[in-house]
Amino acid sequence: MNILICDDEQKHLDILTTYIRDYMTAKAVNFTIDAVLDPQKIINSKQVYQLVFLDIQINEFNGIELSKILKERNNKVVIFFVTAYNGYQDDAMDVRAFRFFEKPIIPERLYSGLEKAMEYIDETYFDFYLYTNNEHIKMPIDDICYVLRENRKTFVITVNGTFQTKDSFDDLANRLQCSFFYKIHKSFIINLHYVTKYKYNELYINNTRIPIASRRQADFHKFWFMYVKRR
């Protein structure tokens, strides 16, 4: 999961980063955090995020306008506004903000909001573009059962069939950073929604047995039970 925090004060960046990192680590979620002081870096990067925390006034930038740019990249991004200013609730609702927090952040309220956000992300379909046979296929990301690397080729197994893609396995691993995907082996990325049987060293998606790499077994075991708890 790609997470963005943007604020023009370093102390607020540090506080939020600590809270969010602690939460995601406790929930065994795979995540990266970009903590950014300058919104122009976000605009220039073209990075896609699933979870975003924005100040509304960021130097000369307007956080509402920045949120619109991020929604163009992923219209299902979860946006939290964090600000010391009042009077922006209506504007925040116009861009379908998930929550509105006032500074200083109250940790209990933040964690409650994150719980709701994770439930939403688990249930949300993301649009996913797969490049195969010289054409793009647009599909809900939750239609992907698992990704397989075999003989230097990459296959995406979906509810609608199997596709060989020109995208690299590692590229797909970076793009599939939702809270219900997990890279359990150097050759497998699985969607937990489709797991029909799980043992410590292997799992099944329908009738397909998929091994879990020995060095990933302990971490995945924790991740699996946190996922089940969220469900």
Image (spheres, helix red, strand yellow):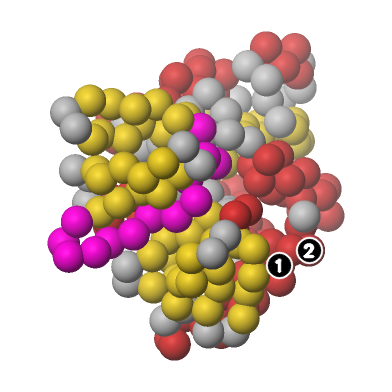
Residue 149 painted magenta: yes
User: Does residue 139 appear anywhere in the picture?
Assistant: yes
Q: Nearer the viewer, residue 204 or 12?
A: 204
The main secondary structure of the magenta stretch is: strand
| Residue drawn at the location 64% of the way across and 63% of the way down | 196
Q: Say the numbered circle drawn on residue 226.
A: 1
Q: Say the numbered circle drawn on residue 229.
A: 2
Q: Nearer the viewer, residue 24 or 181?
A: 181
Above or below, comparing residue 48 to residue 203 in the picture: above
x, y percent for residue 47: 36, 37
Q: Residue furthest bottom?
A: 214
Distance Cα–Cα, label 2 vs label 1? 5 Å
Q: Secondary structure at mark 1?
A: helix
x, y percent for residue 197: 64, 70
x, y percent for residue 3: 51, 47
Relative side of 189 to 114, left or right = left
Residue 154 painted magenta: no
Q: Secondary structure at mark 2?
A: helix
| Residue drawn at the location 38% of the way across and 65% of the way down | 188
Mark 2 Cα within 10 Å, few/some/many (few <14, many 20+)? few
Amino acid carrying mark 2 in the image: Lys
- Count of marks placed on residues: 2
Residues at marks 2 and 1 touching, judged by CB atoms closer than 8 Å: yes
- State which region is magenta: 140-153
Amino acid carrying mark 1 in the image: Met
Mark 1 Cα within 10 Å, few/some/many (few <14, many 20+)? some
Q: Nearer the viewer, residue 167 or 223?
A: 167
Relative side of 210 to 77, left or right = left
| Residue drawn at the location 68% of the way across and 25% of the way down | 97
Q: Quadrant of residue 39?
A: top left
Above or below, comparing residue 189 to residue 127 in the picture: below
x, y percent for residue 127: 47, 30
